[in-house]
Amino acid sequence: MSDEEVGARERHETPAQSADRRWSDLTQEVRIAQTGSQIMFGFLLSVAFTDRFARLHGFDRGLYVVVVILGALATGTLIAPVTYHRLLAGHHVKSQMVGAVSQLVAVGVCLLAAAIGAALLLLLRVAGLGWAAWPIVAAVLVWFALCWLALPLLLRRRDAPSRDDEAPPGGASR
């Protein structure tokens, strides 16, 4: 039995109610990442129209292009739940939609982390840090991996009862 099914059973939810709750949770979560990616992407687009941008050459100019592409991909991926909902609403596929959109959000957050890392690298290089920028960016990306992935997975693993410890409803043993 999946974690979602166990959670729905514990809440006494129907599958439709569980899908509705999970969709609501997912849309609340994605709003934060969407907003951040959109703001960052907007700023990135405006950089190309500054005097300082004209002085970027070689690696830094290429890095800027990579940052903009990553920002566009992250923004598009994190906006995708809107189109999923618009195209699939009323087609009775919410449970499948929640699973697909959850995967898209995970990809979008990874793209956003890559865009932030590349943007930070560009900023630190332009600020004059040169090669020292690389370990700083690496440390920031490790921090993201810890905060966004390792710690939640550790918490889930630590607090999840083992399947052997779970008793079926009614207290009967297996």
Image: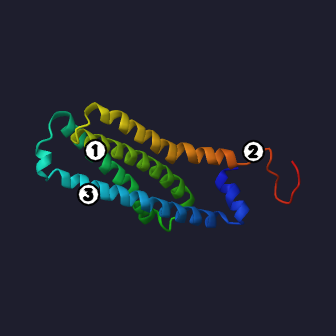
Residue shown at 22%/38% (left/top)? 128
Q: Identify the secondary structure beneath mark 3.
A: helix
Report the disc number at residue 162. Answer: 2
Q: Quadrant of residue 81?
A: bottom left
Question: Does label 1 or label 2 sit earlier along the sequence?
Answer: 1
Q: Residue at x 42, y 45 (%)?
A: 110
Tell me what residue is drawn at x 11 percent, y 50 percent.
Answer: 51
Q: Which amino acid type corresponds to the residue marked 2 in the rendered image?
A: Ser
Q: Can you see residue 92? A: no
The total number of labels drawn is 3
Q: Label 1 is placed on what type of residue?
A: Val
Occupied quadrant, residue 96: bottom right
- Disc 1, SS: helix
The secondary structure type at the circle numbered 2 is loop
Q: Which residue is mark 3?
A: 42
Q: Which mark is residue 67?
A: 1
Marks 2 and 3: in contact by CB < 8 Å?
A: no
Q: Is residue 98 among the parts visible in the rendering? A: yes
Three-letter amino acid code of the residue under disc 3: Gly
Q: CA distance from mark 3 to mark 2?
A: 46 Å
Mark 3 to mark 1: distance in Å?
Answer: 12 Å
Q: Position of residue 106 (x, y in %)?
A: 47, 49
Q: Quick check: 120 left or right of 93?
A: left
Task: Give the percent coordinates (x, y) of residue 49.
Answer: 14, 53
Whole-angstrom CA distance, mark 1 to mark 2, is 43 Å
Taking 37 as reference, is 128 above or below it? above
